[in-house]
Image: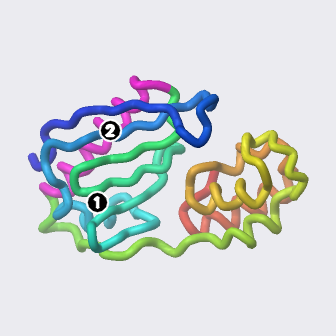
Amino acid sequence: MLLKNYRLEIFNSKCQPGALSVHCFAHLDQDVSEALPYLNSVLGGFEYVKDPPTVSFKSQGKLITVHGRKIAVNALKDEEEARKIVEWLKREINDAWEKRDLIEPCYQGMPKPGIIEILKLLPKTNCKECNEPTCMVFATKIAEGAKGIDDCPQLGNQKKKLLESYLQNYSMGS
């Protein structure tokens, strides 16, 4: 077992102090850097950085970044959800590490969707119903994996289907 212990740090966003969600850092007692290329292969990270090694991906509706000694997770309901996701990730890291002889390590991220392509399919009303100041910011959050299609209440069925189809090319459907 590579990762044995961690310490959770739960905090509110400094940029959005009134937000209903929290973020967390899991400070790792063990360095998992060597496992990250294997984790990237297994979980299909959309961003991989070689130095220092980090992998980012979207899972369970969350944007997750794994560093050698820290895991960052955004937009959590509470500490219980944070602990559940970090425990799941701990199992994934250890499983990928234990099966590394059977896994082809991946040192690059997946292709990313275009922000302008996403924006073209949004209503472009800047209504703020998605809790973002503009549709451009919302499109950026979708491209990063921090927001999903269902977060736009004004998105009509036809545009929603087109956007879902576009994002499926990047494994980022809603």
Disc 2 is placed on an element classified as helix
The answer to whether residue 103 is left or right of residue 64 is left
The quadrant where residue 73 appears: top left
Which residue type does callout 2 highlight? Val
Q: Residue at x 61, y 62 (%)?
A: 143
Mark 1 or 2, which is nearer the eye? 2
Q: Residue at x 39, y 30 (%)?
A: 10
The quadrant where residue 33 appears: bottom left
As drawn, which residue projects farthest toward the left?
1
* Chain part drawn in magenta: 78-98
Nearest the eye: 126 or 153: 126
- Of the numbered discs in the image, which one, if any, rests on residue 39? 1
Q: Residue at x 63, y 55 (%)?
A: 141
What residue sits right under mark 2 in the picture? Answer: 86
> How far across and down, in percent of the image, does residue 58 sit?
48, 53
The answer to whether residue 41 is left or right of residue 143 is left
**Distance (Cα) linking label 1 and label 2:** 14 Å
Its colouring scheme is rainbow
> How far across and down, in percent of the image, does residue 150 sit?
71, 44
> How far across and down, in percent of the image, does residue 151 sit?
71, 43
> How far across and down, in percent of the image, does residue 52 sit?
27, 68
**Is disc 1 surrounded by few (<14), some (14 to 19) or many (20+) residues within 10 Å?**
many
Which residue type does callout 1 highlight? Leu
The answer to whether residue 76 is left or right of residue 156 is left
Closer to the chain start, of discs 1 and 2, is 1
Q: Is residue 38 magenta?
A: no
Q: Is label 1 in contact with label 2 (beta carbons under 8 Å)?
A: no
165 lies above or below 85 = below
Disc 1 is placed on an element classified as helix
* Secondary structure that dominates the magenta span: helix
